[in-house]
């Protein structure tokens, strides 16, 4: 049986710590990481698009899970390469990711960072993941839990999930940025497996209780920072546009100056070749007179 990391030894009793509390969860991750499948697993229904359907905009679904009201927001995944098309542009993906915060007012209790368990998780992948998490502001890491998706428990039958994380330096570094919080959901489960969704909710509630006054990543704050960042980007782009225009003007002025000088030289040469009087011709003309 694969182990879910984070709070080993914690029983599902933590689910009763906040009996009347609704949980707001936001799923983030790369494209085809399995976010929609995770959302379906948490809610226990086919609430989100099935595997293979690209999520282009943030979508909110809700339901009752283990006796608790849970709101889940699925977001578009980022791509390692922009394959073209305005809808797939990195800027639009980032914008739609942040739009998720409008769908879970007054904020998110947890950002579930969905990561396919890969033994080749690279430093580049980790850096891209970090860039997208940090879009949600400086407090985002305090509310993030790494949620590994595994196709089959057999993939980990020879070792525990904790050992796999420890053996992959990049995964370990990512988990450490999340305060050591991680969990795993399997796309295929067998009889006798623990209730991994209930364990996940227990870990999220533990995050909330531990955070106290900062129990939630506030939507207003995230959207305010996003708006400020967008203004800064627009201002920077405007400055770059003006610089490019000035550079073009300088280039055109230099080209015009070169062209004018060249035309003048050609005109002077033309006069010489077309009959400008020589010194001898001038002398003869004067002598004749």
Image (cartoon, rainbow, N blue to C red):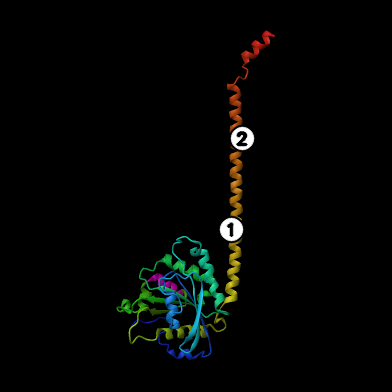
Q: Which mark is residue 237?
A: 1
Name which residue lies at 61% across and 56% down: 239
Q: Is residue 73 magenta?
A: no
Image quadrant in which the C terminus is located: top right
Identify the residue position indicated by label 2 in the image: 260
Task: Name which of mark 2 and mark 1 comes first in the sequence.
Answer: 1
Q: Residue 45 at what x, y percent from top left?
A: 43, 82
Residue that sits furthest to the top in the current view: 288
Side (left or right) of 160 relative to 131: left
Q: Are marks 2 and 1 in contact (CB under 8 Å)?
A: no
Going 43% across and 78% down the picture, which residue do you hit? Answer: 38
Magenta region, mostly helix, strand or loop? helix
Look at the numbered disc 1 and give the secondary structure of its residue. helix
Residue 63 visible somewhere in the drawing: yes
Residue sitting at 60 percent across and 52 percent down? 243
Span of residues in magenta: 168-176
Q: Residues within 10 Å of mark 1 (few under 14, many from 20)?
A: few
Q: Nearer the viewer, residue 130 or 113?
A: 113
Q: Is residue 249 above or below residue 50?
A: above
| Magenta span contains residue 172 | yes
- The tag on residue 9 is none
User: Where is residue 102 drawn, in percent x and y?
Assistant: 57, 75
């Amino acid at each position: 049986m694969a182990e879910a990391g984070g709070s080993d030894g914690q029983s599902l009793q933590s689910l009763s710590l906040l009996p009347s509390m609704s949980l707001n969860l936001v799923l983030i991750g790369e494209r085809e990481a399995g976010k929609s499948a995770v959302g379906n697993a948490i809610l226990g229904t086919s609430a989100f698009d099935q595997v293979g359907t690209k999520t282009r905009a943030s979508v909110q679904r809700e339901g009752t899970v283990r006796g608790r009201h849970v709101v889940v927001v699925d977001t578009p995944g980022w791509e390692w390469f922009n394959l073209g098309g305005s809808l797939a542009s990195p800027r639009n993906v980032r914008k739609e990711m942040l739009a998720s915060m409008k769908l879970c007012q007054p904020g998110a209790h947890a950002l579930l960072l969905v990561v396919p368990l890969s033994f080749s998780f690279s430093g580049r992948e980790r850096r891209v993941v970090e860039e997208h998490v940090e879009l949600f502001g400086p407090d985002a890491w305090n509310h993030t839990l790494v949620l590994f998706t595994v196709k089959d428990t057999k993939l980990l039958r020879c070792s525990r999930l904790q050992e796999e994380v420890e053996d992959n330096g990049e995964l370990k570094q990512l988990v450490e940025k999340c305060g050591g919080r991680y969990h795993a959901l399997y796309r295929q489960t067998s009889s006798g497996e623990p209730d991994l969704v209930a364990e996940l909710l227990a870990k999220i509630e533990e995050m909330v209780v531990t955070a106290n006054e900062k129990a939630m990543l506030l939507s207003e704050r995230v959207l305010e920072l996003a708006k400020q960042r967008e203004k800064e980007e627009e201002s920077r782009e405007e400055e770059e546009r003006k610089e490019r225009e000035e550079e073009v003007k300088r280039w055109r002025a230099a080209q015009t100056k070169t062209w004018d000088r060249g035309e003048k030289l050609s005109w002077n040469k033309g006069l010489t070749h077309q009959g400008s009087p020589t010194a001898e011709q001038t002398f003869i003309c004067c002598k004749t007179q």
